[in-house]
Image (cartoon, rainbow, N blue to C red):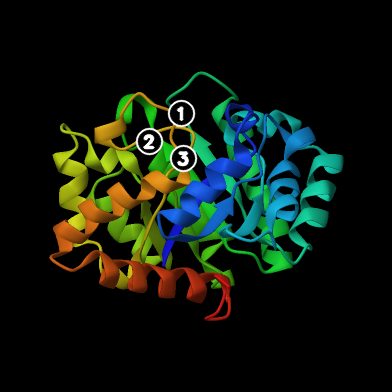
Amino acid sequence: MLIDSHAHLDSPRYDEDREQMLRRAADAGVGVVLSIGIGEGPAEMQRGLVVCREFNGKPGMPRLYASAGIYPHNTPEADEAALAKLDNLLAQPEVIACGEIGLDYYHEGAPHPVQKEGLIAQLLVASQRKRPILIHCRGTNESADAWEDLFEVLDEHWAATGLGGVMHCFGGGWEQAERSLDLGFLISFAGNVTYQRAQPLRDVAARVPLNCMLFETDAPWLAPNALRGKRNEPAFVVQTAQTLAELHNVSPEDLAAATSRNFRRLFNLPSGMGN
């Protein structure tokens, strides 16, 4: 069974065919999808859960779980009401993670100190609800500045919880990967690991132990190389998984089994979670 560990199923780009898209995922062997709840800001962060509840239990569908969080550029909206809403969402049984949260210095957006304050506030909520976190991190012009700030925050405000999390759509180097592993994080690779110019990222992926790895689509973005430029969807995670299996010289089935165990372990889910 394949797991898409990060997909924005609430995207308006699926409004015309969301059910069919999920059926295609199941037909491709995707048994579980984590539906990310950030929307366009705190006012919409329940939408990942809404999708989850709409489709769970229908025949021919993957099992859906949800997350909730405030994206770095929306942290100016992380007021008391937004954090209370986040806390309520993380209390729901289907909401297994807080995220995606983190730091993004690459795009113009919220000031860096505001992003850090918003991240720290969400870490407190997540720790109280005992939910792992899904981290987005991207530095200025691909430098390590956001990563350095991220690790400083995580060392001070998260490491002691032992809850870990996922470095989503990982794009750092081996130094950042190793520090993430030391903090107990899983490292998740998206479709960009298949791109022709992504050899440095593939080199990192080849070094990440199988018991510390996940894969994802980040749909509707980052379709794998063979479908680049198209709307991504969970069914396409098969191609990313194939690339990662080749890097580790294992069968796709063995990679799927290993990453499924990792997902269950991190989120404390039963072995029959895809049923």
User: Can residue 9 be seen?
Assistant: no
Badge 2 density bin: few <14, some 14–19, many ≥20, Cα 10 Å: some
Amino acid, disc 1: Tyr
- The residue that mark 3 highlights is 233
Instruction: Report x, y in % for residue 253.
Output: 28, 69
Amino acid, disc 3: Glu
Instruction: Return the residue nearer the eye: 158 or 156.
Output: 158
- The residue that mark 2 highlights is 145
User: Would residue 80 appear left or right of 68 to someone viewing this image?
Assistant: right
Measuring 33% from the left and 59% from the top, which residue is drawn there?
179
Instruction: Return the residue nearer the eye: 241 or 177.
Output: 241
Instruction: Report x, y in % for residue 272.
Output: 55, 79
Measuring 19% from the left and 37% from the top, which residue is drawn there?
198
Tell me the number on the disc at residue 105: 1
User: Can residue 48 be seen?
Assistant: yes
Give the mark nearest the N terminus, 1 or 2. Answer: 1
User: Would residue 207 appear left or right of 68 to someone viewing this image?
Assistant: left
Contact between marks 3 and 2 (CB within 8 A): the answer is: no
Amino acid, disc 2: Asp
Q: In the figure, residue 244 lies in which quadrant? A: bottom left
* Cα distance between the residues tagged 1 and 2: 8 Å
Q: Secondary structure at mark 2?
A: helix
Looking at the image, is mark 3 or mark 1 nearer the viewer? 3
Q: Secondary structure at mark 1?
A: loop
Badge 1 density bin: few <14, some 14–19, many ≥20, Cα 10 Å: many
The quarter of the image holding the N terminus is bottom left
Q: In the figure, residue 117 lies in which quadrant? A: top right
Q: In the figure, residue 156 lies in which quadrant? A: bottom right
Instruction: Report x, y in % for residue 126.
Output: 68, 59
Q: Is residue 237 above or below residue 180?
A: above
* Cα distance between the residues tagged 3 and 1: 27 Å
Instruction: Report x, y in % for residue 118.
Output: 66, 41
